[in-house]
Amino acid sequence: MKLASYIAQRIMLIIPVLIGLTLLTFTLSHIVPGDPALLAAGQQATAEMVEQIRQEFGLDKPLYVQYGMYIKGLLTGDWGRSILSRRPVLEDLRVFWPATFELVSVGMLIAIVIGIPLGVVSAVMQGRWPDHFSRVYALLGVSIPAFWLALLLQWFIALRFGFLPIGGRINSQIGAPETITGLYILDSILTMNGPALKSALTHILLPAITLSMPPLATITRMTRSSMLETLNQEYIRTARAKGLSERVILLRHALRNAFLPTLTMVGLSIGWLMGGSVLVETIYDWPGIGLYAVKSAMSLDFMPIMGITFIYGVIFSLINLVVDLLYAAVDPRIQLT
Amino acid sequence: MASQEDKQLQLTRQLMAHMERNGVNRRQFLRMLAMVGGGASLSSLLAACGASPSTPASNSGSASSDSSAAPEATTAPASNDAETAAEDTTTSEEAPAAGGASSKLLVVASGQDISNLDPHIGHDYSNASAQKAVYDTLFVYRNNPPEVKQLLATEYSSNDDATVWTFKLAENAVFHDGTPVKASDVVYSAERMLRKNKGAAWLFTSIIEEGSVVASDDKTVVFNLTVPFAPLPLILPWLFIVNEKVVKEHDVDGDEGEKWLMENEAGSGPFVIKSWNVGDSYEFTAVEDYWAGWEGDHAPGFIWKIVRESSSARLGMLNGDYHMAFDLSAEDAIALEETGDFVLNRQQGLGVFSIKMNNAKGPCSDVNVRKAISYAYDAESVLAALNGLGVLLDGPLPNLGDYNNPNLNLYRFDMEKAKEALAQSQYPNGGFELEYIYVTGLLIQEQIGLILLDKLSELNISLKMTPLVWPDMVARAQSPETAADLMPVYAGTTYGDPDNFLWQAYHSSQAGFWSAASHYKNPEFDALIEEARSTPDTAKRIELYHKAQEILVNDCVEIWSHSEFLRVTWSKKVQGYNYCPIMGYYLRPVYLVD
Amino acid sequence: MSLWQRRWRRFRRNRLSMLGAVVVVFLVLLAIFGPYFAPYPKDATGAVHIADRLKPPSAEHWMGTDDVGRDILSRILVGSRLSLGAGVIVLLVAIGIGATLGALSGYIGGAFDRLLQRVTDIFLTVPDLILAMAVSAALGPSLVNVVIAISLVWWPGYCRLVRAEVLRTKNELFVEATRALGTPDWQILFRHVIPNILTPVLVKASMDIGFAVLTLASLGFIGLGSQPPAPDWGKMISDGRRFLPESWWISAFPGMAIFMTVFAFNLLGDGVRDVFDPRARD
């Protein structure tokens, strides 16, 4: 009961924020210079075609009416149309989302799988070379411009040596596996499609590595410092005094307690990954939301931008909520409300 | 081939005759021609037709003289059609060619998405290419110079004043669902296009309205034009025929299948859709028993792969992942060509790249300032930045043969002359700023801006470079107050008559249209080209246009820069592809060999 | 005084941070004097040499030339002023807005505080790169607009920080004591509260400046930053991208410059945080 009311309370807080977000993006979309109807109509368009498009998109109505229309649409599943693709924004998002989700997940996975052990190792070997390395890396990883690293990897690994593909999601001759989830890796496993799986994995490797750099750094760092903190706690010393093996201490006690701050960091990193995917997807020609966002921004196609910002706002708010709930689940000392 | 030219010649003659008689708005027609291309051959044909019978066609030696006796010939004789059919293996009489799909799947890399497959809405090169794959039209464009060939139409004729056109449809033409292509489908397609009023509709809106197109029987369709229009076959490649029944089955709230057709097809073309991954790739499968047959070998299908980065496309070409690439950078295209395994198109098109100067407002309203800027324009450097994949323009027109005035006093790059010109202007010492607006992300336009900026600084003129999206540039061009001092424009919609280039860009009535961003107004010039467009006599027209070009160049209206090649690149394993300057790629004849 | 000496000593002990500090000083000097060292300073302000385009690194051009023949080293040197300058301005604006509103919010409290908290939530709920991209796309591509966009996205962070510090300080004993003595609110704010919040703001700013440079470069890379012929690092990288297979140097060197700058500031920021906030240290 308490949990339900807490969740309800949190969602009540999310709603005004999301409304504010729509106001912000709506304002932005009307600061944009130029005429979106002209953009949609194309070079050869006559004045009537432009007018027709203007009416179709409701661009001839007063601002508050347009905002009202937008909100109503948001609630009823009509997120407007992309002027460029002429497809409904929601549909575009549905199509592009799995690619971004797959990329962010694999990037996150790399960051966790490497970051946590690295953090543990550098905590245990505090002051020795793995620790120094991880400390330098923690700063290096967040300092490398993702787009530059992407280009370097492309140039070195894909162009010079041809080890991995330079971009895209899958080899077009192999083609996408049958759509079940929209995630190529998962789908090709589910459909037992070997060539597609191999192609999907080789395609995702470079972008995912590029994307995982900063979260890998922060996760390593966070694991290390929270490990150190717990290792110095009273109960660990007690456990040591009791003669428990170092492995048991590490895994059963220290790591479990170091898990919380790391979890927070993972949650926060998802936001970063979604932002960073904008650059990474652009360079690796990865057909996801980030690429869609850049394309729309560059052509001042604002309905998609509004949609993307909104959906990211929703996702991010939910992630925060989930992190908080997990926090409570993991650590009973933490009180909800 | 001669018969093809005859056909075109005849069409054009009809047009000329018709204009002489009815004084139809020629500009309207020419604008349409501009849209559909037409190419150099058309220009020469126009020249040939406009000429008195004693003047031979300027370049087409094969133009048979027999039909010249009948400039108002109103029917396309059946014999002509038969001849066409005999030569053109695409016609329905031919059985599907032997060989079949022995080759591999063709993969083409394009930087541009297929944003809307709806044949009456989507309208750019990628959409057009896909539409040409899944839909048929009464006529199709092929080759360079472009030729219009029959596809769904097997026979056609028109009445004396080219207002009533009758087309016979191929007996064996069937849609992908197996139902025959009927006259009623053509009627529905035409009307749907008119109702949607998007895409290529503007080509037709001035000559037909709903009810104009009627089916007289299942395989005969009649176009009753609202105004006489002789070159109807030249624009019909832009009327895609949809399956009325299928479209109506997918009607949602009276949208006539608009939502559904965006990613699905209801056509009779050589390919059907296999898979549709928005923003990523689109796969098409060949219809093995395509009603019109195949031309020799053919691909089992093709994939339209979106590859936004030129370097990715290049690598994919090298790896054999892609076989054709449409949007490579000059560097990447040349690098591929140099391997010896790829072909890069080096045929000259009819595009005109020029830099509009605001003749009505600001420093550029001073002719001497314009001359100074023109002299300071380092065109050779621009061509070098393009890696030589283009040719410099010798005046306001692309290469149109006799229409080009060979004695123009051009402003070739010369800083000394630039300084002299500036010294005679109101700003002998420079000291002002010009704004150069260009399309965001278009590398060559940015490079041109930088080249100008550098040279203009030697004249003590500063240049502000403002990247904009294209619609904003169009909006800026609308009035002299908002028009930028300098604005590069690539006129890609081309056909070969001087009227298109000169009227659109310099006639006073056009000022404010993006192609007339220079806001040039000169009554003397107006009178000349008005006379030229209503004059049937080619020699006279040539004279008038020579004079018109001279005026433009003397007024130094804008910087006439260069004409860029279409940078399509294909593997030597690709067979059957012929460059055609008309928008969109016709992939039916293209296939791979090992 | 001795407090600062102790801090300095602690900072100096951290070799990495010292390295960062040295590089930062070097970069600042470059930003100030770099244009005078640039071998071809005009290449950063508009000169082009088509005949020299796409030349690999050599004795004349240490870092090669770009697609219109400009010397890359010169452009990087002149560009450092642009990048660092814009980064500093972003922080000044973000801190200016954020700290003022945060202080007011914390001090006034009530409805104003609640409203402002929701407003900051709005900005913090979307990945900042995406929001900054949307804002600068809407305003139009230019250096000024990018600076506005990033500041707009970043001020809530400082707002939150300052508000929290103000709330903390407000309730501390000495502030309550002064208030009891009848000191006016604004005097308390300026005498006691602000000096106390200065430290955390400085620490955060020293960490953020590298990210400001990075974000600026990212937006420049997308094409939203300063416009040609300005030597924007991010734009230099994206320009070079089209020539990557043969002419790697166009993208590689500006990227190196960004990386060095961001890394140096991060090292420095890390040291500064250690000094002022020993708790954050392990």
Image (cartoon, rainbow, N blue to C red):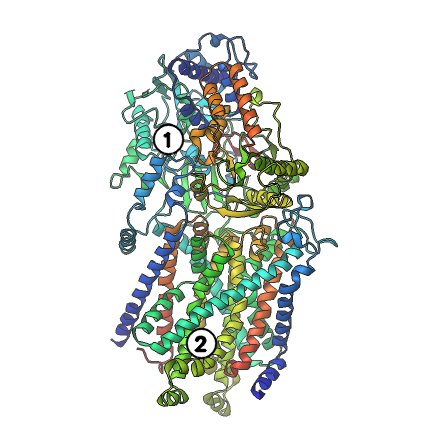
* Tag shown at residue B458: none
Relative horizontal placement of residue C140, taking residue B176 as reference (left or right) = right
Q: Which amino acid does label 1 sit on?
A: Trp
Q: Where is residue B310 in the image (x, y as percent from the top left)?
A: 55, 45
Q: Can residue C248 be seen in this view?
A: no
| Chain under numbered label 1 | B
Q: Which chain carries label 2?
A: A
Label 1, secondary structure: give it.
Answer: helix
Q: Position of residue C159 (x, y in %)?
A: 41, 72
Above or below, A56 against C31 in this view is above
Q: Name the residue under label 2.
A: A261
| Figure quadrant of residue C36 | bottom right
Q: In front: A317, or A245?
A: A317
Image position of B420 with respect to C272: above or below: above
Badge 2 marks a residue whose secondary structure is helix
Q: With B22 as the anchor, is C92 left or right in this view?
A: right
Q: Where is residue B107 in the image (x, y as percent from the top left)?
A: 51, 40
In this rendering, position of residue A95 left or right of residue B583: left
Which residue is tagged 1? B202
Work out which quarter of the rendered image holds the C terminus of chain B and state it. top right
Residue C70's x, y, as percent? 65, 50
Marks 2 and 1, how far apart at CA: 63 Å
Foreground residue among C166 and B83: C166
Which quadrant of the structure image shows residue A265?
bottom left
Please, what is the three-letter code of the amino acid marked with disc 2?
Answer: Pro
Q: Are marks 2 and 1 in contact (CB under 8 Å)?
A: no
Residue B365 located left or right of residue B248: right
Work out whether disc 2 and disc 1 sit on a shared chain.
Answer: no
